[in-house]
């Protein structure tokens, strides 16, 4: 065994011991599962749109590939999306606590989006699965005025010693969001602090019950079948 390999094994064992210790203290530390068979991290409209947008941030470019491989290797644990915050534990050379602060969408920007989408979203299911007209899709995914955060609205806070703007752990977490949006696309709206029901054609008719219904519908839906051609590209 080479010296390098020995060092890698030691660090892996150290990380595993740390995981066991924290689990014993009650943390779940559940790895975010990534589809292994597909070359694409995300399979659905919102997940893919999130990843595409991420990759358009030029000054993140050099850090993103390492984050991708961390995520693929199951190193992103307990990823949580809350209004304005992403948090996870990332298993690198050690266990790192990674927090990402994302400014909520400004109210006036959200109102613009709502106005521009008026009458174009027929149901929450259509919205969450991305069954939207091209014009509306452009509005929602516009890098300047759409739903995704801009780099200047994102602040990283990782417990690792890397002081770069974006460390590989934070970049793994950002990619993790793309994966999580595959099964829970509504979390994009949660993250930006807005209510997706505002976009419905009959805004006001939507309720928490409506979302619960949509979620159970989503769970039973083969999302990739809904997209067909879009996903096959
Ligand atoms: Zn880090």
Image (cartoon, helix red, strand yellow):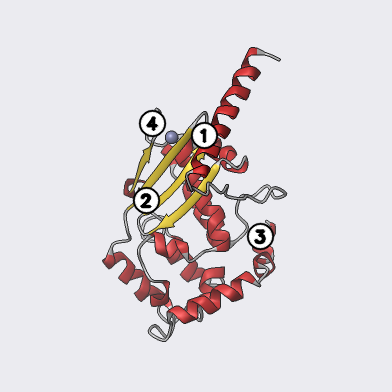
Frontmost residue, 55 versus 97:
97
Res 147 → quadrant: bottom left
| Left or right of 200 on screen, residue 19 | right
The residue to which callout 1 is attached is: 18
Task: Measure the C-alpha gap from mark 2 to mark 4.
Answer: 18 Å
Q: Which mark is residue 150?
A: 2
Q: CA distance from mark 4 to mark 1?
A: 25 Å
Residue, far top: 3
Q: Quadrant of the N terminus?
A: top right
Secondary structure at numbered mark 4: loop
In this rendering, position of residue 128 left or right of residue 60? right
> Does any portion of residue 52 appear in the rendered image?
no
Circle 3 Cα neighbour tier, 10 Å, few/some/many (<14 / 14–19 / ≥20): some
Give residue 164's mark: 4
Mark 3 sits on what residue? Answer: 231
Per the model, the C-alpha gap separating discs 3 and 2 is 25 Å
Quarter of the rendered image showing ligand 1: top left
Q: Earlier in the sequence, mark 2 or mark 4?
A: 2
The residue at the point 37 percent across, 51 percent down is 150
Residue 106 picture location, percent across and down: 28, 62
Mark 4 nearby-residue class (10 Å; few <14, some 14–19, many ≥20): few
Q: Along the polypeptide, which appears first: circle 2 or circle 1?
A: 1
Counting residues from the start of the chain, the first of labels 3 and 2 encountered is 2
Q: Give the distance between the C-alpha atoms of the residues marked 1 and 3, in whole angstroms.
A: 39 Å
The reply to whether residue 115 is visible in this rendering is yes
Residue 71, image x, y percentages: 57, 43
Dot in front, 2 or 1: 1
Secondary structure under the numbered disc 1 in the rendered image: helix
Tell me where residue 230 appears, x and y as whole percent: 64, 62
The disc, 4 or 3, on the residue closer to the chain's N-terminal end is: 4
Within 10 Å of disc 1 (Cα), the crowding (few <14, some 14-19, many 20+) is some
Q: Is residue 84 above or below residue 131?
A: above
């Amino acid at each position: 065994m080479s010296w390098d390999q020995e060092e890698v094994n030691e660090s892996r064992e150290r990380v595993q011991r740390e995981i066991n210790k924290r689990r014993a203290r009650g943390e779940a530390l559940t790895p975010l599962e990534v589809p292994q068979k597909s070359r694409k991290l995300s399979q659905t409209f919102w997940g893919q749109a999130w990843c595409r947008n991420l990759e358009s941030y030029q000054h993140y470019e050099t850090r993103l590939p390492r984050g991708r491989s961390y995520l693929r290797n199951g190193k992103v644990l307990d990823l949580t999306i809350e209004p304005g915050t992403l948090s996870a534990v990332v298993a690198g050379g050690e266990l790192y606590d990674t927090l990402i602060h994302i400014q909520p969408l400004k109210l006036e920007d959200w109102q613009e989006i709502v106005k521009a989408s008026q009458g174009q979203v027929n149901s929450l299911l259509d919205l969450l699965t991305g069954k939207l007209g091209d014009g509306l899709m452009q509005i929602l995914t516009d890098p300047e005025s759409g739903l995704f955060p801009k780099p200047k609205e994102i602040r990283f806070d990782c417990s690792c010693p890397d002081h770069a703007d974006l460390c590989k752990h934070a970049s793994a977490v950002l990619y993790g969001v793309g994966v999580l949006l595959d099964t829970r696309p509504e979390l994009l709206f949660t993250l930006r602090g807005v209510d997706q029901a505002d976009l419905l054609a009959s805004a006001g008719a939507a309720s928490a019950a409506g979302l619960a219904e949509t979620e159970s519908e989503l769970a039973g839906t083969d999302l990739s079948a809904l997209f067909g051609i879009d996903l096959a590209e």
